[in-house]
Structure formats: C-alpha cells, structure tokens
Image (cartoon, helix red, strand yellow):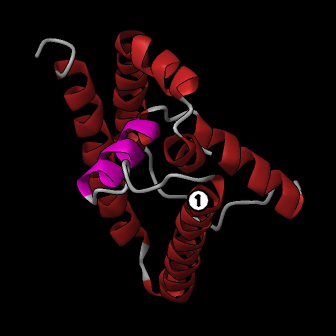
C-alpha cells in the first residue's frame, strides 16, 4: 500500500501523513517503547503457542493491518525511491504499477525466506536462547521507540 502511495505520488495521502508526523512519531514512539519493555520482560512459553484458529486469512488481515499501522513506511519508500532516482523517472501509471509489483514481490520473497528459515530453526532454539532473542528484540524495539521520540526534539 505504502509502496503504491510513494510510486503513484499520491501527494494528498503522503501530505496528510507528513502533516501529522508529530503525533504519529509521538504515539508510535511511545507504543514501541511499551512493546520493547513487554518483549524484553516476556518469558518464552514452556510449550509452543496455541493457535487461535483464525486461519490464513485472519493471519493475513492482522499482519496487513499491523503493517499499515506503521506510517513511517511511506517515508522509507519515498526516501528509497528518491535515493535510487526513481521519483522523477516514473512518468506513467504502467511504470508505477510495475514498480509497485516489484516492491510487492520483493517483500513477499523476503517474508517467505524469513518465515522458512525461522521454521527450520524453530526446533533447534532452546528456551534460554528464546529468552535472549526476546531481550535483544526488546532492546531493539525499545531503541527504535526512543529514536522516534528523540526525533521530536531534533
């Protein structure tokens, strides 16, 4: 979605997100700090997590909405497109659609590789190892939240 916004140059949507970036950074930074603390202090379960039975569609929708909740993604895509000099090069809807398709396929491939590797390594990681993964992830997520909050003062 955000790749499409950046590629098609929907200035209204990107302008709206940019005009509200103070609140988005504040709320997003606070949420990331909260999530970082929760992740850092959480203990890995004794057994694997029980599935909620939402199925693939439920998992897709929840992941999609979680991804859309990160408005800084539009800024990332805009910066990446500008860095590669794509912003002025895409002049028609066909080129924009091809660019969005490339972003979609690249993202899908990344998630397939990531989930495949995690699936293969899942049984090899001990509970203690998962505790350290939680700690590292919590510090990383909390650090991103702190950076987001610090960016309000710069």
In the image, is residue 24 above or below residue 69?
A: above
Quadrant the N terminus occupies: top right
Residue drawn at x 87%, y 54% as measured from the top left: 54
Front-lying residue, 53 or 150: 150
- Residue for badge 1: 100
Residue drawn at x 30%, y 45% as measured from the top left: 79
Does the magenta segment cover residue 81?
Answer: yes
Residue drawn at x 44%, y 41% as measured from the top left: 73
Residue drawn at x 57%, y 25% as measured from the top left: 13
Residue 50 pos. (x, y %): 75, 60
In the image, is residue 21 above or below residue 64?
A: above
Q: Is residue 127 left or right of residue 136?
A: right
Image label count: 1
In which quadrant of the rendered view does residue 85 lie? bottom left
Q: Which residues are magenta?
A: 74-83
Residue 138 pos. (x, y %): 32, 45
> For the residue labelled by badge 1, is the local secondary structure a helix, a strand or a loop?
helix
In the image, is residue 61 above or below residue 109?
A: above
User: Which secondary structure class fits the magenta region best?
Assistant: helix
Residue 84 pos. (x, y %): 28, 60
Q: Is residue 55 left or right of residue 111?
A: right
């Amino acid at each position: 979605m955000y790749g499409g916004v950046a590629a098609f140059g929907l200035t209204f949507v990107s302008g709206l997100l940019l005009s509200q970036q103070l609140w988005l950074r504040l709320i997003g930074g606070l949420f990331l700090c909260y999530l970082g603390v929760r992740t850092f202090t959480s203990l890995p379960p004794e057994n694997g997590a029980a599935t909620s039975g939402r199925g693939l569609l439920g998992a897709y929708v929840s992941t999609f909405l979680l991804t859309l909740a990160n408005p800084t993604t539009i800024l990332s895509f805009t910066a990446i497109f500008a860095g590669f000099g794509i912003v002025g090069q895409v002049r028609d809807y066909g080129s924009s659609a091809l660019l969005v398709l490339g972003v979609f396929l690249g993202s899908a491939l990344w998630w397939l590789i990531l989930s495949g590797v995690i699936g293969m390594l899942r049984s090899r990681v001990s509970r203690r190892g998962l505790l350290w993964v939680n700690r590292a992830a919590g510090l990383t997520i909390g650090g991103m939240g702190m950076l987001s909050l610090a960016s309000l003062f710069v």
